[in-house]
Image (cartoon, rainbow, N blue to C red):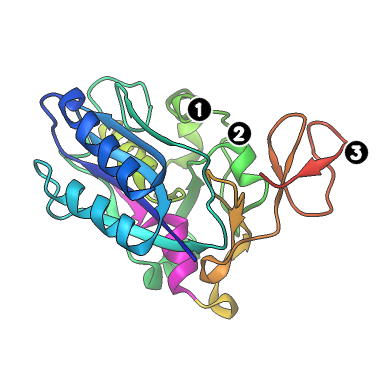
Amino acid sequence: MITVAALYHFTPFADPQDLRGPLFDLAKAQGIMGTLLLATEGINGTIAGTREGIDAILAHIRALPGCADLVWKESRADKMPFVRMKVRIKSEIVTLGVAGVDPLARVGRHVPPQDWNALIQAPDVAVIDTRNAYEISIGTFEGAIDPGTSTFREFPAWWQENQHKFAGKRIAMFCTGGIRCEKSTNYLLGQGVPEVFHLQGGVLKYLEEIPEPESLWQGECFVFDHRVAVGHGLKQGSAQMCWTCGHPMAAGVECPECGPRSVTTR
């Protein structure tokens, strides 16, 4: 059984390039596959391998400056969900493209999965899915708003065009693992939204901790590896990828972009 670890951590790195080589070499030595992104604002990524290999990488990351309290989410895969290991240097570990957005300064109020259902069912709360449209197409929370974005970079423009619709509302935001909401909630607070909330640990943590009979999640959660999606209990889902456009779709359903063409799991 393969262990899959999704992680991110915001902390200042003076020179991410200095961290790249040792991290990549350790991953290669341990047989770890996946992608890790390094930037001056921190680290982000998903990796997979043996229990021992994952533990070695996590210990290495926790020893990096400011990373002692690193939090990650784990799931399992029957086979290796990645084909190679990449450690890349980026300008942002998740790209919003707005100057001055700083999750280390402030973020929305974190809401644990156990309290999420009550929050999003409150009549004065607007629930916004900060993921991309192709991810949302196979699963989201009941009643959540889809901004229709193809990249996270498009979210600020969407908000500027639609913010008038949320006057007087508390805003609850969620994403796959939590990282996008660290930036989107900071952004909304900076735009003057007084009450902004953030699903702690993202959809992955919710699906891990909330039993399906009590869940408000509908469908599956897209993940960026060969499993395509996971469901409740973080079990591998049934979603497939369109071989033409690469977008996910529910099993047995035609691709909304390409119509009745062949599909294949990644």
Numbered tag placed on residue 252 in the rendering: none
Label 2: how many residues lie within 10 Å, few (<14), some (14-19) or many (20+)? Answer: some
Q: Which residue is mark 3?
A: 260
Amino acid type at image mark 3:
Pro
Q: Nearer the viewer, mark 2 or mark 1?
A: 2
Label 1: few (<14), some (14–19) or many (≥20) C-alpha neighbours in 10 Å: few
The residue located at (28%, 48%) in the rendering is 108
Kindly identify which numbered label has been placed on residue 158.
1
Answer whether residue 193 is visible to the viewer in this image.
no
Residue type beneath disc 1: Trp
Depicted 62 relative to depicted 187: above or below: below
Query: What's the CA distance linking mark 1 and mark 3?
Result: 31 Å
Q: How many marks?
A: 3
The one nearer the camera, 138 or 108, is 138
Question: Residue 123 in the image: x percent, y percent?
Answer: 49, 61
Q: CA distance from mark 2 to mark 1?
A: 9 Å
Left or right of 194? Residue 146 is right
Please, what secondary structure does the residue beneath circle 1 have? helix
Q: Which residue is mark 2?
A: 148
Q: Residue at x 34, y 41 (%)?
A: 28
Confirm or deny contact between disc 2 and disc 1 (CB under 8 A).
yes
The answer to which image quadrant residue 237 occupies is bottom right
Residue under the point 9% across and 41% down: 65
Q: What is the x, y in percent for residue 107?
A: 24, 45
SS assignment at label 2: loop
Indicate the secondary structure of the residue bearing disc 3: loop
Residue in view at x 59 percent, y 42 percent: 146
Which residues fall within the magenta stretch? 193-210
The C terminus lies in quadrant: top right
252, 211: nearer the viewer: 252
Q: Is residue 156 left or right of residue 69?
A: right
